Each structure stands twice: as structure tokens, then as C-alpha cells.
Amino acid sequence: MAVDSRETFIAVQRNGDGNLTRFKTSSGRILNYEDALQEVNAGAIAGVNIFKGRDGEMYIRGDADGDPSNNLDALPTFE
């Protein structure tokens, strides 16, 4: 089985409403939400996918693997 060498999200930033706004990758890059969406869509980030919300907007979510500890909401925050 090949090792997945793609980056992962290791920390997040939230706005005042608690919505995710920025992501820190395993290589230390900081991505705003729009850039993160593009990278996930391009397949550059492992462990996440994009879905269309009821409002028609596109959102990032963790892959459903039954492990709540790796959900985006469970990631630590960064400054």
C-alpha cells in the first residue's frame, strides 16, 4: 500500500460565529478558506472532501471514517 504524501490539516482558525476560516497544513502553510477549497478540490490535501451545503455554497469537511478525533472541529486552533 502506497504512503499518502499529501498534506493534511493540523489546525484551524475560526471567526466569531465559530465557522472555520483558515487552515494550517502539515507542512506549515496557512490557507484561507477559499485557497483551502481549491487545494482540497485539486486533491492536494488528504483526509478531507468538499460538499455542497443546502445554501448552495461549497464546504470542506473531514472524510467520514468513524473517528471523531480527526474531524475538522476537533483540530486545535492556531494564532
Image (cartoon, rainbow, N blue to C red):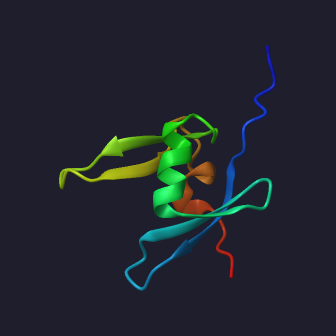
Rendered image quadrant of residue 16: bottom left
In this rendering, position of residue 78 left or right of residue 58? right
Rendered image quadrant of residue 10: bottom right
In this rendering, position of residue 45 left or right of residue 37? right
Up-down: is 59 above or below 1? below
Q: Position of residue 76 (x, y in %)?
A: 66, 69
Given the current orientation, which residue lies at the most extreme left position? 55
Q: Identify the residue at image location x=47%, y=68%.
A: 20
Q: Where is residue 73 in the image (x, y as percent from the top left)?
A: 52, 62
Up-down: is 25 above or below 40? below
Q: Identify the residue at image location x=60%, y=39%.
A: 47
Q: Where is residue 17 in the image (x, y as percent from the top left)?
A: 37, 81
Given the current orientation, which residue lies at the most extreme top position? 1
Given the current orientation, which residue lies at the most extreme bottom position? 16
Q: Which of 67 and 33 is in front in this view?
A: 33
Q: Nearer the viewer, residue 8 or 33?
A: 33
Rendered image quadrant of residue 78: bottom right
Q: Quarter holding the N terminus?
A: top right
Q: Identify the residue at image location x=63%, y=42%.
A: 45
Q: Where is residue 7 in the image (x, y as percent from the top left)?
A: 72, 44
Q: Identify the residue at image location x=77%, y=53%.
A: 26
In this rendering, position of residue 34 left or right of residue 17? right
